[in-house]
Amino acid sequence: MRILAIGDVHGCAQQLDAVLRQNDCERVVFLGDMIDRGPNSRTVLERIFSLQEDNPQTVFALKGNHEDMALRFLDNPVRNGPFWLRNGGLQTLASFGLTGLSELSRQNALEDAAMKFRASLGREMAEWLQDLPARLQFRNVHFVHAGADPGRPMGTQDNASCIWGHPDFLRVARQDSQWVVHGHTIVDQPAIKNGRISVDTGAYATGTLTAAVIDDGVTFLRSDGQVP
């Protein structure tokens, strides 16, 4: 079984298409942070939602901290809006045609934007985002967005560590022969080290989206077609 694990897309639709054109794996896992920062979050969301809806047994998406921020904005736009907007939410809202906002926007503007954003998402996609899992497992390979506590079994990880990260994740090697595939932390080159497989090469900033191909070993592919 070959699995394609795609790093943080962050609204970069062209790079996503370039990676998917190279895909020859039986399963695809999106590691979260599908939205924010890049210019085409709506296109990316709709594409991944449609892919999973059409292929529910082979296409999977995880919740990243940017999806979590967007959902918190929908839940309480006044309290949670400014933080999300200054961390990429402005670009996501703009992709849905919602402009003229800033982290200094007043209560009425934030509440109106949240209402229109929810309506643009539609009930099915909003529920899909809410229900995205924090982690996924195939054999001894685990997929998360941000990290995991290396001192705890993967089956007992809390969602916050998987979505937002854990302070020991990048400092302490796992000792249980389990591998964790993750994004969230930008790396110059994808890496395999200390029980971690890191694939986020900062697509929104570098123009390069990276994915890991996992079968009996691990190889990487990039949106520009070059070999990492």
Image: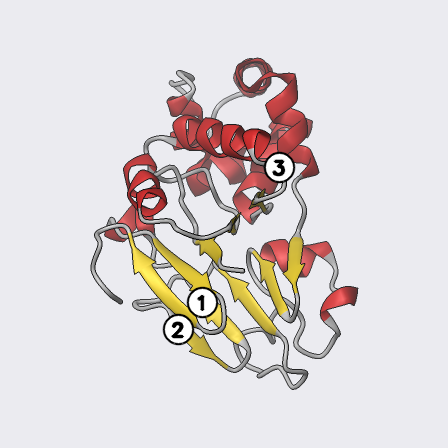
Measured from the top left, where is residue 111 in percent x and y? 60, 18
Q: Are marks 1 and 2 in contact (CB under 8 Å)?
A: yes
The residue wearing badge 3 is 56
**Residue 155 quadrant:** bottom right
At label 1, which amino acid type do we have? Ser
In this picture, residue 141 sits left or right of residue 188: right
At label 3, which amino acid type do we have? Pro
- Residue 164 shows in this picture: yes
Residue at 42% over, 33% down: 44
Q: Residues within 10 Å of mark 1 (few under 14, many from 20)?
A: many
Residue at 60% over, 15% down: 115
Measured from the top left, where is residue 199 in percent x and y? 41, 62
The residue wearing badge 2 is 191
Measured from the top left, where is residue 207 in percent x and y? 24, 48
Mark 1 lies on a secondary structure that is strand
Q: Which residue appears farthest toward the bottom when viewing the image? A: 175
**Badge number at residue 198:** 1
Q: CA distance from mark 2 to mark 3?
A: 29 Å
At label 2, which amino acid type do we have? Ala
